[in-house]
């Protein structure tokens, strides 16, 4: 869901008549048409909107994917105006994500949640410009995701860098679109078999394992081998559920991220946009070394002084 009410929607005129939209209903073009942004600062508008959300929540769904409509507030510059006066992007984003989360929890209880982007990062070489933008506030990022990467090995690296940024700012849990959201047009499925498998392996070792985007994302779109590998890592993710649940609870309480990059990352845009390593740990308990190139052999540098347990044997690594 987004904050937009399109001008061709059946509820648009009611919202416009009652002044429920930002800037008196200024129409903005976005990726699903043309519409106005809801004014969350107006209590009557919020109540009107929540009643419509309840029509869906009452069916039994547990939440929404809250996609990034909040940056469109910048299109209302120089003065985005709502019920309380001028509203900046940070205020509007907090309204959007918090109010949606709170309404879901109110109706669905503790099982309710939202998927929300912690942040976005675009860097030269992969895109034509720099962009760094924070989206959802950390205190509701229990199921964050990184979008929208291309279905390539470079796309995997982009997703990981966004995860590392989110970790630096202590977002609790997140993942990314397995196989990438955007199509690689060199392949009929929108991504190669190798990219899909490596991304699925990465996704299994993220708190959020999710699969979606353009083109084909079903493992059977390739072959039986892909299906078996995918099933194996889905089962690994299920087996890790108690760990993710416990570590996520601890991380949230301590205002930390479950994922911790191995690279020494500083709070400077140029430094942590190009990390020296794409390895990471999960709550200092599991070391993950993603495969970010089309290869079958890789070198992993283990942290110093860690012990790996294998049945009745243990091995000490001191690098």
Image (cartoon, rainbow, N blue to C red):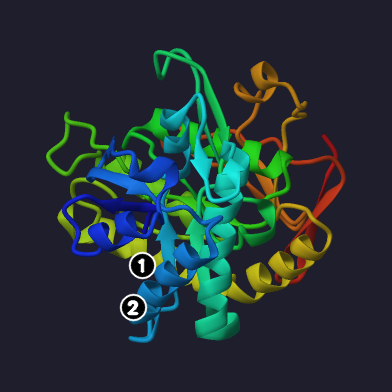
Which percent across, then down, holds residue 132? 56, 27
Closer-to-camera residue (90/193):
90
Q: Residue most toward the front?
A: 17
Numbered disc 1: secondary structure: helix
The answer to which image quadrant residue 195 occupies is top left
Could you tell me which quadrant the C terminus lies in? top right
What residue is shown with label 1? 231
Q: Position of residue 60 (x, y in %)?
A: 37, 86
Q: Is residue 189 left or right of residue 259?
A: left
Q: Residue at 25% x, 39% y: name it.
A: 192
> Left or right: where does residue 4 sit relative to residue 32?
right
Q: Secondary structure at mark 2?
A: helix
- Residue under circle 2? 56
Residue at 47% of width from left, 13% of height from top? 124
Q: In this rendered view, identify the residue nearer to me: 2 or 234.
A: 2
Q: Position of residue 119 (x, y in %)?
A: 56, 40
């Amino acid at each position: 869901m987004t904050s937009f009410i399109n001008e061709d929607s059946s509820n648009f005129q009611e919202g416009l008549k009652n002044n429920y939209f930002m800037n008196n209903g200024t129409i903005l073009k976005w990726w699903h048409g043309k519409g106005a942004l809801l004014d969350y600062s107006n209590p009557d508008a919020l109540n009107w909107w929540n009643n419509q959300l309840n029509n869906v929540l009452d069916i039994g769904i547990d939440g929404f994917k809250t996609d990034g409509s909040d940056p469109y507030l910048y299109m209302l510059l120089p003065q985005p105006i709502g019920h309380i006066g001028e509203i900046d992007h940070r205020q509007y984003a907090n309204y959007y994500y918090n109010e949606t989360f709170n309404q879901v929890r109110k109706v669905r209880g503790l099982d309710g949640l939202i998927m929300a982007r912690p942040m976005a990062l675009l860097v030269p070489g992969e895109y034509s410009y720099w962009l760094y933008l924070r989206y959802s506030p950390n205190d509701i990022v229990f199921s964050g995701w990184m979008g929208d990467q291309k279905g390539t090995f470079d796309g995997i690296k982009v997703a990981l860098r966004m995860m590392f940024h989110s970790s630096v700012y202590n977002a609790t849990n997140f993942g990314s679109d397995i196989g990438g959201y955007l199509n690689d047009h060199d392949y009929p499925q929108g991504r190669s078999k190798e990219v899909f498998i490596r991304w699925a392996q990465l996704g299994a070792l993220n708190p959020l394992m999710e699969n979606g985007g353009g083109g084909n994302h079903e493992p059977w779109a390739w072959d039986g081998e892909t299906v078996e590998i995918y099933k194996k890592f889905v089962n690994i993710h299920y087996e890790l559920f108690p760990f993710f649940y416990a570590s996520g609870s601890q991380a949230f309480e301590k205002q930390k991220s479950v994922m911790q990059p191995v690279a020494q990352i500083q709070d400077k845009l140029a430094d942590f946009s190009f990390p020296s390593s794409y390895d990471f740990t999960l709550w200092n308990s599991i070391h993950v070394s993603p495969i970010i190139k089309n290869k079958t052999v890789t070198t992993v540098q283990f942290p110093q002084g860690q012990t790996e347990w294998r049945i009745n044997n243990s091995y000490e690594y001191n690098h």
